[in-house]
Amino acid sequence: MLPTWTVVVLLVASVGVLVYQGLAILYAYQMPTLAPAAASLGASSRVSVIIAARNEVDDLAGTLDTLRVQDYSNLEVVVVDGGSTDGTQGVIDARAPRVRRIDEPPLPDRWVGKNWACWAGAKATQGDWLLFLDADVRLHPAAVRTVVAWAESEQADLATISPRVEMKGFWERLVIPFWTQMVLTYFRAPRVNRPDSSAAMANGQFLMIRRTVYEQIGGHEAVRSYVLEDVELARRVRAAGLKLRIAHAVDLAVTRMYRDPDEMFEGLLKNVHGTEFSAGRLVGFWFGLVGLFLLPLALLPLGLWAQSWPLIGMGAFLWVALFGKHVGFARALGAPAVYGLLYPAAVVYYLRLVSVSLARGLRGRPVNWKGRTYPLLEPSGPNR
């Protein structure tokens, strides 16, 4: 038998776990959705699409072809090539003059390559809106028009959407639904749309910002050393008292984030690790993953061992709630239900990510991505 106080503590902790798990469901429910809008009379605001590309030959052609058929006439497309060696430049040049290629200038110290390319592209364009688009995001023909109309109707200063994520391999289907939950809860995504909220985030896959605002907050130069530059830009927009808007838009855009397990691990590790390394944050993240997703599953066997009906009942409920929630997320994102039942493996995957990040950070190892390395920032940040 367990002491009464132990049973009470375990039950209270279980309620806390359920509340946290419910946040992901609540935020997913609260996320606004954006669908292709009906055709309008014209395109008044000029939009400059800027794509930073480095060895993107497998994805870029599809992205550029969907841009060429956009039903928004006041559009320019610029691709900043970061010294590609795989034929990316030929893909761009084959679509001239509708698509313009800019060769990325030599990368300065303390700049992340994508940020440098975006900064160079912004300076070479004239649009009222700057649309920073990843090289692997394919768009519905009405995507640009729909997002511009939505942003202007909302009087947004920065508007961003989350596309549908294609998942074709085992690890993608296992990990990406769990990653989606992490993003929703960590950034409190739908609260970004509330003016009274401090929540701030943006999705660099499709990030549209007014040029005047971009210049006001210092653009990519102000976030030059950050790997999560999209989030940092959003935080600066929020700090300036300006308006952010975010929406889920699976009918407007689609992407396949990672093409093989190694690329996915390095890509997610880059985001977990970042150049803003914090050992305390990572340790807290590690224990949070264990405490919120794995330890609750131990309550049912503990209750059976202790012959405690309250623990048995709560433990059984936790199993149903946790597995049911992850099955729901897997299905909602297009993965078979079985991947939700395997969610503890996704948690272990993330624990490995955090452990590797912590080990690298404590040794002062830089961030690696697309053949480039970026040193960790000083604790005070890059620009202070």
Image: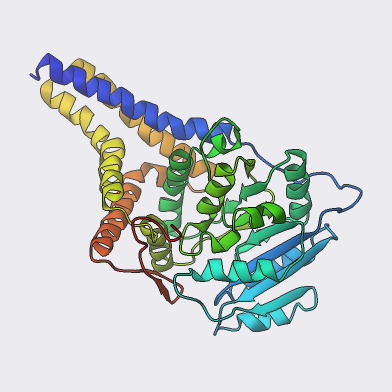
Which of 229/335 is in front?
A: 229
Q: Is residue 124 left or right of residue 379?
A: right
For the point 42% across and 44% down, the residue is 182
Q: Quadrant of the N terminus?
A: top left
Looking at the picture, does residue 272 appear above or below residue 308? below
Tell me residue 159's x, y (percent): 66, 47
Q: Quadrant of the C terminus?
A: bottom left
For the point 77% across and 61% down, the residue is 127
Q: Quadrant of residue 289?
A: top left
Q: Would residue 316 be visible to someone looking at this image? A: yes
Looking at the picture, does residue 316 appear above or below residue 351? above
Q: Is residue 37 left or right of residue 83?
A: right
Tell me residue 349's x, y (percent): 32, 54
Q: Quadrant of residue 361?
A: bottom left
Q: Is residue 347 left or right of residue 57?
A: left
For the point 61% across and 36% down, the residue is 193
Tell me residue 353's x, y (percent): 32, 57
